[in-house]
């Protein structure tokens, strides 16, 4: 006759297993976003001719940028939703306002990281091009998700 574990012990084991699985999923998701940004910066830097000392230094640069951009994104989203009423359709004015906010925040963050982390050296015009590209990508992806959400509710 097999010994059965008490029901409370099984519940605790399943909760621990669930927490471990969720933690692994969160870490993998964050790592996936980091890798996408790493290779995006790698491609942009090779196109723009930016010199960096080693791939490790580029990874640190991207990591610092991601941490600061999470904080900056919260400010941009809050500021955007305070100033622009939520509407189902997004006008060109609202799109350009969102682009401008994202561009300024990205440029500030890239300038801060460039100033604090010397192994990656960016010229001022490279900072502007990189910030504009990132802002354009973010705003376009935001617009696409809003369009998809709007088509689901119909």
Image (cartoon, rainbow, N blue to C red):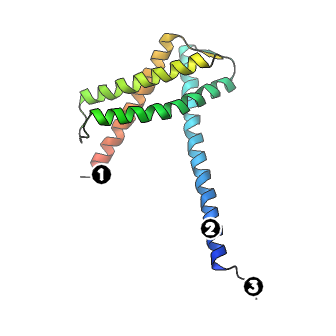
Q: Residue at x 46, y 17 (%)?
A: 129
Above or below, 124 against 28 in this view is: above
> Residue 152, which numbered label?
1
Image coords of residue 134 (percent x, y): 45, 26
Instruction: Give the secondary structure at mark 1.
Output: helix
Q: Measure the C-alpha gap from mark 2 to mark 1.
A: 35 Å
Foreground mark, 2 or 1, reads: 2
Image coords of residue 56 (percent x, y): 69, 26
Quarter of image, res 67? top right
Quarter of image, res 35? top right
Above or below, 39 against 45 in this view is: below
> Residue 2, which numbered label?
3
Tell me whether circle 3 and circle 1 mark residues in contact (CB < 8 Å).
no
> Residue 128, which numbered label?
none
Foreground mark, 3 or 1, reads: 3
- Nearest the eye: 151 or 17: 17
Instruction: Give the secondary structure at mark 3.
Output: loop
Label 2 crowd bin: few (<14), some (14–19), many (20+), radius 10 Å: few
- Nearest the eye: 143 or 46: 143
Would residue 49 be visible to someone looking at this image?
A: yes
């Amino acid at each position: 006759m097999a010994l059965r574990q008490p029901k409370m012990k099984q519940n605790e084991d399943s909760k621990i297993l669930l927490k471990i699985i969720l933690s692994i999923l969160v870490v993998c998701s964050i790592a996936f976003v980091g890798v996408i940004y790493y290779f995006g910066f790698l491609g942009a830097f090779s196109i723009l001719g930016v010199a960096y000392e080693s791939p490790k230094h580029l990874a640190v640069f991207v990591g610092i940028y991601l941490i600061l951009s999470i904080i900056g994104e919260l400010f941009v989203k809050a500021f955007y939703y305070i100033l622009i009423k939520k509407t189902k359709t997004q006008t060109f004015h609202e799109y350009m306002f969102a682009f401008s906010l994202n561009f300024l925040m990205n440029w500030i963050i890239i300038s801060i990281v460039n100033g604090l982390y010397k192994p990656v050296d960016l010229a001022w015009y490279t900072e502007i091009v990189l910030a504009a590209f990132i802002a354009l990508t973010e705003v376009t992806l935001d617009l696409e998700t809003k369009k998809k959400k709007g088509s689901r509710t119909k």
